[in-house]
Amino acid sequence: MTTLLFFDDLRLNRRDNIERRIGRPRLLADAVYRDPAHETPWGYPTVFYNADTRLWRMMYQGLSPPVKAEYCAALLAESEDGLHWRPRDTAGEIDMPGRFASNQIIPSGEFNEFPTCYVDELAPPEERIKGLVVFSCAKHRLATRLWVSADGLHWKLKKGVEWQKPGADPATAVFWNEVRGSYTFTSRPTCSDRRIAIYETRDWQTFTKPELVIHADALDTPLTEPYGMPVIPYEGVYIGLLWLFHCVPQVKGSSPHKFLGGHVDCQLAYSLNGWHWQRTLREPFIPNGCPGEPDSGCVYPSTWAIREDGDIDLYASACTHEHGELPEGSGSILTYRLRRDGFVYLTSTSGPGVVGTRALAWNAGEAELNVQCSGGFVRVQVTDSSGEVLPGYGFDNCLPFSGDSRSWIPSWKGNRLMSSLPARTLRLEVELANARLYAIRGDFLPLTAGECWRIEQLGETPSPRPGF
């Protein structure tokens, strides 16, 4: 199956009265987690399901009052449903010198910050979970260490592994890059350099040098600085959760860079190959909440889980105050719920609109549309590669859909379905009236004009081009 998402118009040939908008995950108000003894404004949670215990586990960073770096702890919580958490008491299972938290999992003297973990499904079981640890090796200089675990509870130091030289401020994130066949990192280029760099490894022993991929530009609000970018590999696209620090002007201060004050929210970036990145509309994907709400100051989504229905739970650390202001009780870990494919969508602006794909090499089966149109309707028509409607497959013959479906299958009068068509080149056009289109799925391959011509005139079968 191929999935068309609509971050841009790359796969489109027609847009009549159609607007692109950023999706908005909703905060689950009953799933706010506050560690009873630690602040989590920079918790950077990592969530995974432990099949052995049939529980969800969450590793995160906590700060003990008074909030200082030397009181930073790597902590563990558990949940039956991945939403409602309780600290996991590890004292009876882990002998830890200098322990100061009941749910601590790594001795605090081993790091300054425990910024993030990576659940590596390709690793040997004993190294499935990787803890990317940062520590101070000299004043204003950071170094890195790698801790590994099978279960998120028992950890060991992987000696001799420095995953970034020199080390950078949190948060660093890792994802498996299918296109490049590598573990790909997004990080800051170096300590306090708030831009996004990228590098990779294939063996967790040798690492390429960071390359710059994103920095603030003239379309960003004044004094904005990228703070971090976890990446979701999703349906053939890599989606960056780009944290943006909207700084306040600094004329004088104890720090040589902007630190105290300002909000952090999340926008979206995307990539076809996980290496070269584009920005979307400069609008928050996860905005700050209203004053007093748990995400009203800063929000840092860092991990996710896909539910059985395809919807996505996004986990974030957040705080009620602006950047660097950490009063007691200000931090929490939140869960947001996103509709399947709900990162961006297309919608008609006023009255019906039409969106059409470029030519597709259609193989077989049905088209599936993720649509939301409870107060409107959606119709589909099928054309040949030049735009001529196939007999019986026009908008007027389509049975309109009104409702909410993540996998609506269009049909036409006379019991016509897409599966009735032979393998061929075609285009799909979707009419939206007070409706949202999130994705199109099917057994097809998007074509360039040259590929389409070679299929139709020479009978050449195109090959998929991952990353393009």
Image (cartoon, rainbow, N blue to C red):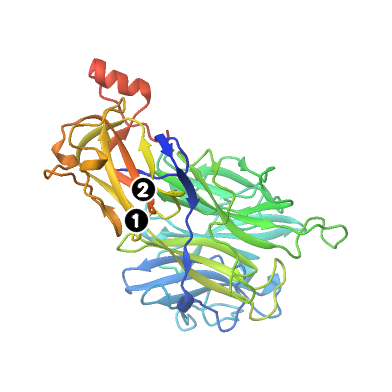
Residue positioned 27% across, 39% down in the render: 381
Residue 376 numbered mark, or none: 1
Q: Residue at the top extreme?
A: 458
177 versus 105 height, above or below: above
Q: Residue at the right extreme?
A: 252
Ranked by sequence position, the earlier of labels 1 and 2 is 1
Residue type at mark 2 is Leu
The residue identified by callout 2 is: 432
Q: Secondary structure at mark 1?
A: loop
- Image check: 159 left or right of 68? left
- Image check: 309 left or right of 169? left
**Image spot of residue 386 (x, y percent):** 31, 24
- Quarter location, residue 48: bottom left
Crowd around label 1: few <14 · some 14–19 · many ≥20 (10 Å): some
Residue positioned 45% across, 46% down in the render: 238
Q: Secondary structure at mark 2?
A: strand
Q: Quadrant of the N terminus?
A: top left
Residue type at mark 1 is Gly
- Image check: 206 left or right of 380? right
41 versus 271 height, above or below: below
Residue 58 seen in render: yes
**Image spot of residue 401 (x, y percent):** 26, 53
Front one among 381 and 437: 381
